Image: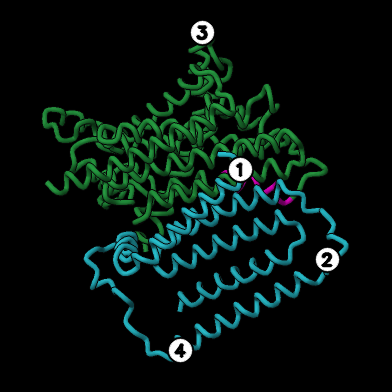
Chain colours: A green, B cyan
Amino acid sequence: MIDALLIPTIKILIVLNATLVAVSYMVLLERKVIAWAQSRLGPMRVGPYGILQPIADALKLMIKEDITPVRADKWVFTAAPIITMVPALIVYAVIPFGPEVSLFGRQVTLYITDINVGLLYIVSVASIGVYGLILAGYASNSKYPLLASLRASAQLISYEVAVTLTLVSVIMVAGSLSMVSIVRAQESQQVWFAFIQPVAFVIFFIGGLAETNRAPFDLPEAEQELTGGFHTEYSGMRFALFFLAEYANIIVVSSVATTLFLGGWLRPFPSWEWLSFLDIIPSWMWFLLKSFAFLYVFVWVRATFPRYRYDQLMRLGWKVLIPLAILNLVVTGIVKVLVGAS
Amino acid sequence: MAEAIVFYTLAAFILGFAVLVVTTKDTVHSVLFLVLDFLFVAALYVLLEAPFLAAIQVLVYAGGIVVLYLFVVMLVNLQRPPEAHEDPRRLTRVGFGLSMAVLAELAAIAAYSASIPASPAIGSAAALPVSGNTEEVGWMLYTSYLIPFEIASMLLLVAMIGAILLAKREL
């Protein structure tokens, strides 16, 4: 009874709450890092060094007036933020934060579940998230959101292809779809897959930027052209849901990249004995550190690069990344057969 | 027992959403009910212990094909009045004929499967050299069902080339 119900429930509660806290602090991190990149201070007023800023933001968004436009499609308008938020959160069910540890004299796994088709589950759940963007733009009954949502969905569908192809090449190396097995494969092959699959790693990162609508691919919310993007007509908590979902998706991409390419919870060079003093840092901490590095790079990229033009974005996706990903897949297959034959 | 309860609940939802798909006036809402329907079908696959098929169902149908449906429905003007010379009940008759054909086909399948004795599933788990749902599906596709699999991929290729030819008159 305890094993079947109580422990998973506790794990889900912890992961959900930690995610929401991490998401709100991701906003602060972004504002701070961009401010530093531009020689500013960033938020400083709420708490020391602005550390309580996310709480103030959340309070503000909760007590703001929640407006539904008169000519909006009310049901779809209400459902769209939820459809965006739910996939961004349920993906965490298969992300392995660490291996089995003993806690209070009981073996506990540091992931909610390890299903046989974990990676496929992530891809399919993420593909449902597109509906939130499309429907938000459609239901608002307003031209800027509609244009932005068309842009966003075309962008997501295009880059989804390239990202999924890179995942296939990782699956071929790991020989499994389960997230835990992929980390275990990196342990037994004694190398992070970022070194075996550098091309896939780069394509995944670029595709991840595009999938999460981040700069330099943040065309769906290009303020100069589209006012606010697909959520222009949203206000208050419903707007906040879109905002949270966006950052939750960034964290998902970072954790998936960590798991697939940077060895998940493993310490650097897990086969080198003389580095074993690094084991003093627990495995889940390694996972969080690596994910945090990704998050930092996401913000860094936003502070550094200007936005792409729409035709450049489409050209990069369809004419560079997808052919490159297919080529990488073919080469991976050939090498795998050659290595297996010898 | 529990399995039967879950199955009939899911089946009720699937049929209910399917009815809503064809009866809702607003086309976008109708497409959304179709998405819900596909998600419940995926749940049915999970119940049948076919997680790979469930994930593919969500990825390809709910997340891929219906997004394109939604695009078309949103961008095409559906308010166009019917042409004057068209028989307004033509579509009803065609639809009725098609659904009768599908019903007859289903009845034939049911009758056929009832008439033959239950054979052991082709390649039951013991006979396969691999384990795990995904691996078994892959093994079956590349051994027993290789030719249907290749024909299906050929069809997809033809469809893709056809779409490119239609969209780009001058190549």
Q: For the residue marked with disc 1, what is the amino acid?
A: Arg
Q: Is residue B84 above or below residue A267?
A: below
- Mark 3–mark 1 contact, CB under 8 Å? no
* Structural crowding at the residue carrying mark 2, measured as other residues with C-alpha within 10 Å and reported as few (<14), some (14–19) or many (≥20): few
Residue range (magenta): A75-86
Looking at the rendered image, the disc whose residue lies closer to the viewer, 4 or 1, is 1
* Structural crowding at the residue carrying mark 3, measured as other residues with C-alpha within 10 Å and reported as few (<14), some (14–19) or many (≥20): few
Q: Residue at x 56, y 49 (%)?
A: B163
Q: Which mark is residue A39?
A: 3
Q: Is residue A298 above or below residue A200?
A: above
SS assignment at label 4: helix
Looking at the rendered image, the disc whose residue lies closer to the viewer, 3 or 1, is 1
| Lower sequence index among marks 1 and 2 | 2
Residue with the mark numbered 2: B86
Residue A329 visible somewhere in the drawing:
yes
Q: Is residue A337 magenta?
A: no
* Same chain letter for marks 4 and 1: yes
Q: Chain of mark 2?
A: B
- Mark 1–mark 2 contact, CB under 8 Å? no
Q: Is residue B169 above or below residue A59?
A: below
Q: Chain of mark 3?
A: A
Instruction: Name the image quarter holding the C terminus of chain B.
Output: top right
Q: Which mark is residue B169?
A: 1
Q: Is residue A96 left or right of residue A41?
A: left
Q: For the residue marked with disc 2, what is the amino acid?
A: Glu
Estimate the spatial distance between the alpha carbons at disc 3 and disc 4, rounded to whole Å.
77 Å
